[in-house]
Image (cartoon, rainbow, N blue to C red):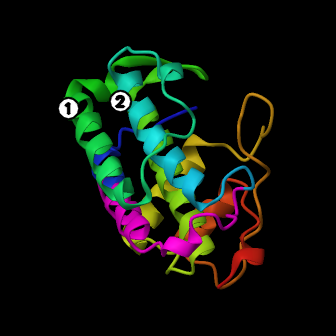
């Protein structure tokens, strides 16, 4: 994975705020609904989003992300608080500017810290799109945020190769009306057309 000199942390902060709003908008009856990410229902997708933030903290702190389950569990009325608590812990590590160029290690490789934040940004926006689509909420993040993330990811995550050690499906051709967040989901392999609200 290649990176630019962009600082992706402000983008990730905004993405986490967007995701928190989506979680807050989930109705109680929707937690067991399916999502565009076939391995997760709504509840487990939210648990995976919280897990991703906690794993990112440990990657930056030279900890072992494998100690965090892929899906964390919380009472359904505590999800927004759980995400914000994990985010606060994340920023205790990642607010240090030196982290952007510090080599960090994760199960999928060793790379500069800014690449780890980019991965987390992509996870938040794509899984945020999944959550919004599954729960009937507006599925587009702020266009400025999503456009910036898409531009970064199109450079950082090449169209090929995909699959195997690159945990993304083939790029999906966006529909003409697709917004930037949907196009980012398409770039990450989501066949979004079947999840139109």
Frontmost residue, 89 versus 103:
89
Q: Quadrant of the C terminus?
A: bottom right
Q: Is residue 85 above or below residue 1?
A: below
Q: Residue at x 77, y 66 (%)?
A: 191
Say if residue 62 shows up in the picture. Answer: yes
Q: Is residue 25 above or below residue 190?
A: below
Q: Is residue 111 left or right of residue 1?
A: left
Taking the magenta stretch, the answer to whether it contains residue 27 is yes
Picture disc at residue 92: 1
Q: Residue at x 57, y 35 (%)?
A: 70
- Picture coordinates of residue 35 (x, y %)? 67, 64
Q: Secondary structure at mark 2?
A: helix
Disc 2: CA contacts within 10 A as few (<14), some (14-19) or many (>=20): many
Q: Quadrant of the N terminus?
A: top right
Say if residue 118 shows up in the picture. Answer: no
- Picture coordinates of residue 47 (x, y %)? 50, 47
Disc 1: CA contacts within 10 A as few (<14), some (14-19) or many (>=20): few
Q: Is residue 100 left or right of residue 116?
A: left
Q: Secondary structure at mark 1?
A: helix
Q: Is residue 89 left or right of residue 19?
A: left
Picture disc at residue 57: 2
Task: Kindly check if marks 1 and 2 are in contact, taking CB atoms under 8 A apart as contact.
Answer: yes
- Picture coordinates of residue 32 (x, y %)? 63, 64
Counting residues from the start of the chain, the first of labels 1 and 2 encountered is: 2
Magenta residues span 13-37
Marks 1 and 2 sit apart, C-alpha to C-alpha, by: 8 Å
Frontmost residue, 155 versus 115:
115
């Amino acid at each position: 994975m290649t990176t630019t000199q962009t600082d992706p942390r402000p983008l990730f902060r905004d993405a986490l705020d967007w995701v928190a709003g989506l979680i807050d908008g989930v109705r109680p009856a929707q937690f067991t609904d399916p999502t565009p990410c076939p391995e997760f229902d709504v509840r487990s997708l939210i648990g995976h989003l919280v897990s991703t933030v906690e794993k990112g903290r440990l990657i930056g702190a030279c900890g072992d992300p494998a100690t965090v389950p892929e899906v964390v569990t919380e009472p359904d009325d505590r999800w927004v608080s759980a995400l914000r608590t994990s985010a606060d812990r994340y920023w205790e590590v990642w607010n240090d500017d030196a982290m952007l160029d510090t080599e960090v290690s994760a199960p999928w490789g060793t790379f500069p810290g800014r690449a780890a934040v980019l991965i987390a940004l992509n996870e938040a926006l794509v899984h945020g799109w999944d959550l919004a689509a599954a729960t009937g909420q507006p599925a587009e993040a702020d266009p400025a945020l999503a456009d910036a993330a898409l531009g970064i990811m199109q450079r950082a995550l090449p169209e090929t190769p995909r699959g195997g050690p690159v945990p993304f499906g083939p790029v999906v051709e966006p529909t003409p009306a697709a917004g930037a967040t949907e196009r980012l989901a398409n770039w990450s392999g989501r066949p979004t057309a079947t999840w139109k609200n």
